[in-house]
């Protein structure tokens, strides 16, 4: 019988990777991810996880080492944050383009300068287009569950793609959360052995990451896009199987009192839990407000998203990242684009907030909703508004 | 990158590619017509050639080969028209002329 334990989420990720029986971990410690790298190093050193731990000299090397290990058919895990994700950036593209199902936990962190170790989604949005499956989680249990699902989804022969699990730095990574771990036998059953269809193998040599001249590059990218789009079906299937096995259910777009609500707030990551408290408060006051939380970021769940907002009149999007000189938050821009050609669509109002670890309280979310409704009626001089900034 | 040999490389569709564009056939870079990159082509005046083979040695593409008569000729499927053979030839055998037709 699985039991509930209290554990820091970074440590719980290490335990999940151990349960998934990873073969190789290559990681470079960086705040706020460090405890993941440290705990996995301990598990390997103590013989609790039979894996090779590669203590690399940088994140660029971490992801490069992961390419090699995943390519030979080893179950591979890494983790990083903020600047570390930026340093490994070019190799992040290579992992998805070469179809290597590495699992990476990203403790989302703001980007320099000024130097910030605290959380926001700037690092996540900078890797938006890298071709990885990307899932946002909100609490410790969701993190553990989705790390396990990530191995099964990514390694599925119909997918064979890397998966990123985004969790908020500090606000989630350093919380001590109640977590139920499945039994080892259950996890063994849930995640089949990893078998790359065309691995590096001296007996049957292949070349990976070859030169792609103009006559073939477009075809390579089209194949990659079709593959990532098609992975949604497997993601849904995996979450269904996970729900059936463990009783916790995950969806591309999570809803909270959103059915039929005229005003919807949309958030991602751990701040969604505070937003839920704000929704509870507003609903107790008789207000017709609901919440959507975008869990599956890539592939973008167009169908589920459009269905979730079809009855709403106002959709207020809170981004925790800023696209400088552009239309505001990257999530809001994508949502506007996804709805533009719909005959019936809510007015979309964008906010950027929670940058660099700035808290947004229940009162803050209430303000965002109130101000969002006001903008939807009267308009605003700005493409978006920044929440909580001192004027 | 081909799963099948029925098509030439530039006839492949995205569905023909192996997962991750992995290449299972060694040496298939030889199918790449780098001659397409050429804007100038070398013309060899063999009446001046002493068969020294310096063009063969210096060709960065490795596409100059010795003929049965002992002269040297570039394979125009691969020749990128860099002109190094023309520069290095001590007898001015090689002249670079503008490539007019692809």
Image (cartoon, rainbow, N blue to C red):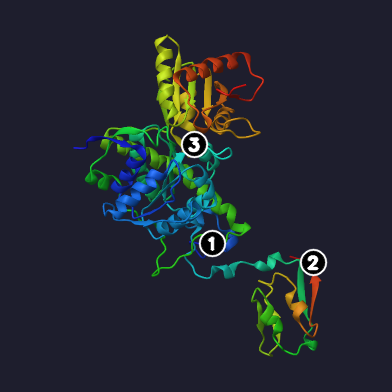
Mark 3 is surrounded, within 10 Å at the Cα level, by few (under 14), some (14 to 19) or many (20 or more) other residues, namely: many
Q: Tag 3's secondary structure?
A: loop
Q: Earlier in the sequence, mark 1 or mark 3?
A: 1
Q: Are marks 3 and 2 on the same chain?
A: no
Quadrant of residue A173 within the rendered picture: top left
Q: Nearer the viewer, mark 2 or mark 1?
A: 1
Q: Is residue A69 left or right of residue A368?
A: left
| Quarter of the figure that contains the N terminus of chain A | top left
Q: Is residue A266 left or right of residue B35?
A: left
Mark 2 is surrounded, within 10 Å at the Cα level, by few (under 14), some (14 to 19) or many (20 or more) other residues, namely: few
Extreme residue toward the front, this view? A115
Q: From the viewer's side, name the closer residue of B84 and B65.
A: B84
Q: Nearer the viewer, mark 3 or mark 2?
A: 3
Q: From the viewer's side, name the closer residue of A236 and B100.
A: A236
Q: What label does residue A210 carry, if any?
A: 1
Give the letter of the chain under mark 1. A
C-alpha separation, residue under disc 3 versus residue under disc 2:
48 Å
C-alpha separation, residue under disc 1 versus residue under disc 3:
29 Å
| Quarter of the figure that contains the C terminus of chain A | top right
Please tell me which residue is depicted at 55% across the width and 55% down the height of the picture: B13
* Above or below, comparing residue A250 to residue A290 in the picture: below
Quadrant of residue B59 within the rendered picture: bottom right
- Which residue is labeled 2 in the image? B100
Q: Is residue A350 left or right of residue A44?
A: right
- Which residue is labeled 3 in the image? A300
């Amino acid at each position: 019988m699985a039991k509930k334990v209290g554990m820091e989420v970074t440590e719980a990720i290490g335990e999940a990777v151990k349960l998934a029986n990873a073969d190789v971990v290559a990681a470079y410690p960086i705040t706020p991810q460090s405890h993941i790298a440290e705990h996995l190093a301990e598990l390997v050193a103590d013989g609790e996880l039979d894996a090779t731990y590669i203590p690399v000299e940088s994140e660029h090397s971490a992801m490069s080492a992961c390419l090699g290990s995943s390519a030979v058919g080893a179950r591979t895990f890494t983790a990083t944050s903020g600047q570390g994700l930026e340093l490994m950036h070019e190799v992040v593209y290579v992992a998805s383009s070469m179809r290597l199902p590495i699992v990476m936990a990203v403790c989302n962190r703001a980007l320099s300068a000024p130097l910030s170790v605290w959380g926001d989604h700037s690092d996540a949005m900078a890797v938006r287009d890298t071709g990885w499956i990307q899932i946002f989680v909100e609490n410790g249990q969701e993190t553990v569950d989705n790390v396990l699902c990530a191995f099964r989804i990514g390694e599925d022969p119909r997918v064979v793609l890397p998966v990123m699990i985004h969790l908020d730095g500090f606000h989630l990574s350093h919380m001590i959360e109640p977590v139920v771990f499945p039994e080892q036998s259950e996890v063994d059953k849930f995640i089949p052995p990893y078998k790359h269809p065309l691995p590096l193998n001296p007996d049957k040599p292949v070349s990976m990451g070859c030169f792609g001249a103009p006559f073939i590059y477009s075809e390579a990218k089209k194949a990659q896009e079709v593959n990532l789009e098609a992975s949604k079906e497997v993601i849904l299937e995996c979450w269904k199987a996970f729900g059936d096995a463990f009783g916790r259910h995950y969806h591309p777009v999570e809803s909270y009192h959103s059915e039929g609500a005229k005003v919807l707030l949309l958030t991602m990551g751990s701040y969604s839990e505070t937003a839920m408290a704000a929704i509870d408060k507003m609903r107790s006051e008789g207000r017709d407000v609901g919440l959507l939380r975008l869990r599956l970021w890539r592939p973008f769940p167009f169908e589920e998203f459009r269905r979730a907002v079809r009855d709403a009149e106002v959709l207020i999007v809170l981004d925790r990242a800023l696209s400088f000189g552009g239309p505001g938050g990257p999530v809001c821009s994508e949502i506007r684009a996804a709805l533009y050609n719909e005959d019936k669509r809510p007015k979309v109002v964008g906010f950027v907030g929670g940058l660099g670890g700035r808290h947004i309280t229940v009162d803050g979310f209430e303000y965002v909703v109130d101000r969002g409704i006001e903008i939807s009626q009267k308009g605003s001089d700005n493409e978006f508004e920044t929440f909580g900034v001192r004027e | 990158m081909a799963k099948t040999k029925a098509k030439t490389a530039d006839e492949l569709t995205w569905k023909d590619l192996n997962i991750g564009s992995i290449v299972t056939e060694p040496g298939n870079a030889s199918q790449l017509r780098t001659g397409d990159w050429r804007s100038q082509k070398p013309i060899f005046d063999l009446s001046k050639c002493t068969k020294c083979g310096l063009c063969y040695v210096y060709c960065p593409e490795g596409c100059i080969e010795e003929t049965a008569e002992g002269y040297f000729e570039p394979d125009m499927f691969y020749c990128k028209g860099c002109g190094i053979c023309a520069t290095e030839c001590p007898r001015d055998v090689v002249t670079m002329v503008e490539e007019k037709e692809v």
